[in-house]
Image: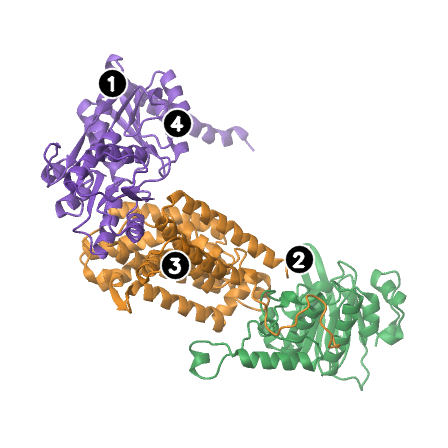
Chain colours: A green, B orange, C purple
Amino acid sequence: MSTTTSASSPLPVLQARGLVKRYGNVTALDGCDFEVLPGEILAVIGDNGAGKSSLIKALSGATVPDEGEILLDGKPVKFRSPLDARAQGIETVYQELAVAPAMSIAENLFLARELVKPGWRGSIFKMIDKRRMLEEATAHMKDLQIGIRSMRQAVETLSGGQRQGVAVARSAAFARHVVILDEPTAALGVKEGNMVLELIRRVRDRGLPVILISHNMPHVFEVADRIHIQRLGRRAALVNTKDVHMSEAVAIMTGAKEADVKAIA
Amino acid sequence: MSTPSAPAGHPRHFSDRLPSLAEVGPLIALVLACAFFISQSSRFLSFQNLSLILQQTMVVAVIAIGQTLIVLTGGIDLSCGMVMAFGSIIMTKFAVTLGLPPAVAILCGIAASTLFGVLNGVLITRIKLPAFIVTLGTLNIAFALTQIYSNAESVSNLPDAIMFFGNTFKLGPADVTYGTVLTLLMYLATWFVLRDTVPGRHLYALGNNAEAARLMGLSSQKILLTVYTLAGAIYGVAALLSVSRTGVGDPQAGQTENLDSITAVVLGGTSLFGGRGSISGTLLGALIVGVFRNGLTLIGVSSVYQVLITGMLVILAVAADKLSHRRG
Amino acid sequence: MNLNSRRLPVARKIVSMCVAASAVWCASASQAADQPVVGLITKTDTNPFFVKMKQGAEAAASKDGAKLITAAGRFDGDNASQVTAIENMMTAGAKAILITPSDTKAIVPSIKKARAAGVMVVALDTPTDPQDATDALFATDNFKAGVLIGKYAKAALNGKPAKIATLDLAPGVSVGVLRHNGFLEGFGVKEGDASIVCSQDTRGDQAKGQTAMENCLQKAPDINVVYTINEPAAAGAYRALKAAGKDKSVMIVSIDGGCEGVRNVKAGSIAATSQQYPLKMASLGVTAGVDYAKTGKKVTGYQDTGVTLITDKPMSGIDSKDTKFGVDNCWGNK
């Protein structure tokens, strides 16, 4: 499937062309394309085995594709590891959230990136600047309007939705180019799920494009600007959410319906 | 989440975390124990007696520092006592039999214990064997090497310099040993590192959620290797304290310290699952055992009850830890 | 593919292994016919007491022309290793087995099996429970060892009121109980007497002996007699006394007669110690084993291998030898 871009469409923040990834005899990605534009929420949907997670792993640096190229702001990049991707400004929120439950929100926000005190106390003794971390954590959470009273609370005292908020806030605080969210509402109830969707919108509104992997169709249709439909290791369609019905999207996902050429945004 | 009402989950009206049962428990237990013994024996509360308790617990207390660091990462070290004994034999044999200057002999002893720490660390991080199994093996290796090198005989006639930490100075009405001071300083240093520095917090993160630490880019290999090596060095210092207290290099020493150090850690509220606990708790745990041993002797209770009570306290401590987990 | 040619080298290997094995077996069998095989199983092989025992056995074996095979547990109380050792020694053709049982009850079934197969089993140092589970027992009379130092302590006190501390082994271990009770009997007091002001366990360990003494002194600063289960515990007790400034005024008595302990008697930190003779136990055992292999005559009953009071300050009416004798006859590194 080719992607037609009109002359006025902006340069994709993150783009991939012809990704191939094989695991032994299994071809997970079979010439997969991808793009996410600035200021958008792009949902990635696909059935089990479609290559969704392999695509995201390649984009977040967790795996190295066998063939194909990835472009960040138009420039080709190679991610050797998730740290590498992070260093280049791509933050990923994993399904397991990657938080240390016994530690405070502030500590989790700055996990592995702690702020140290200035001068010799920071450089020689590596003393943590707890006050600054608290202040900045409070500011980040406030910015995203996440209503948790104290950054000193242990993450394990938070509800599922709040923990998700912490993980999302962490990625938003450090991402420079794009935030990838892997099934952020999967484990949440209705109310908390909606709160997370609201949070995702705020991240987008602050200027960070969001890649949202989800199998929750109502959520996808509620929050995503465009939808990347993954099938059989390739991008089956890339549609504007407004232009397609949920049932159509599901049909393309399962292969019941071939995508209309016109439907590619 | 945009509503300012109390967040779903546990209602919290304090900006700080409430201290958990596991944190306050050891202090309460120690205070209660002391109160009990004060009421039962007029000799308990003298400066001399309290100073004695510190001297009696300092070897286990120092070993327990290393054990605490390891348990915080979710591991365990069954070899600590034997590694200490090995270090003490190297130290004393080098000074007495080989005639090396005391400072050199001491450094060699600490280095020997550190090497065992490195061995533990490498086997756990490179070969990826579980800590329990690895340290069970090094326990036996350290024990055997100690017996072989010492020929199962203790080393005496030590030069005075080696026994420096057994010397006392007057603090008010009490005689305090330098070893006690060193022990407390080591606890302070460890407390500072664990609470206020980046490596300390990384250690907690690794123990609390190893997968999260890995995903965020922390190197568990580096952290674990550092922790086990550091613990080995700490056991070497414990060897020096042991030698200065007993005046001999004893190849039979350290056999009960393996489990005693774990007891101190558990009584202190540190979770054996890793990621939770404090070094101050360990000191309290070691003191609790020492207080009971001393107090029960003062009131004439047979030794076997000391063992019984310690066992009951351990179970209480682990149960309290488990219960305080349920909050999360 | 010629299977035969593939199998042939393997078959050759197996055959040559069988030949070698049977050669070895024949050789050892023929050795057994000439040389009586005696087995020695100790509790551990790191305690100098057992090291000395092994040395005594080896010396006696070479003198008597016997072949000695040895084994030990990994720690005090390791019964399983001793059971395995008995089985292995029987397979190796031992006619007699000498054993210091780690678990005096649990080892009895294995000993029964060995005796039923015609092996003579002699207990050394520690009796089995029951004692007649073995053909014979060569041991120190631990009770008598305690009595000797109890009598000595009483005499050395010279009429002063006694304040006794006992630094014992561990609950229920027969050696510790016998020595403790012997001391009390020799001293002339009953268990629970008011003059016994402190009793603590030490596991025979020096550091624990020091801690126990420190705590006992806190309880009763006027202790003047200290019974210790063995010399390492005594060394620890001495250190505690010295730190409290009481090393000259408090008397320590002990049991074992190891070389280091005798040196402590000479140095004055231990007033008197009952010396026992592990070497003698072992050599008597080996001789008895060789005798049985050659003549079929078993030893029976209890043979006291002797205990001697070692002190440089003898008391009248109590037999003792000085530390020179002690050093000449001690076990451990001289």
Which one is in front in this view, the residue at disc 3 or the one at disc 4? 3
* Distance between mark 1 and mark 3 Cα atoms: 59 Å
Query: Which of the image's four quarters has the C terminus of chain A?
Result: bottom right
* Distance between mark 3 and mark 2 Cα atoms: 52 Å
Q: Mark 4 or mark 1: which comes first in sequence? A: 1
Q: Position of residue B78 (x, y in %)?
A: 43, 50
Which kind of residue does numbered mark 1 sit on?
Answer: Asp
* Distance between mark 3 and mark 4 Cα atoms: 38 Å
The residue that mark 2 highlights is A23
Out of C329 and B223, give the one closest to the viewer.
C329
Residue C107 marker = 4
- Establish whether labels 1 and 3 are both on one chain: no
Residue lying at 40% horizontally and 32% vertically, measured from the top left: C79
Assign a secondary structure to mark 4.
loop
The residue that mark 1 highlights is C34
Residue lying at 60% horizontally and 58% vertically, measured from the top left: B325
Which one is in front in this view, the residue at disc 3 or the one at disc 2? 3
**Relative to B305, is C157 on the left or the right?**
left
* Label 3: chain letter: B
Residue lying at 12% horizontally and 32% vertically, measured from the top left: C319
Residue B326 marker = none
* Label 1: chain letter: C
Asked if disc 2 and disc 1 are in contact, CB closer than 8 Å, the reply is no
* Distance between mark 4 and mark 2 Cα atoms: 59 Å
Assign a secondary structure to mark 3.
helix
Q: Quadrant of residue C182?
A: top left
* Distance between mark 4 and mark 1 Cα atoms: 30 Å
Assign a secondary structure to mark 2.
strand
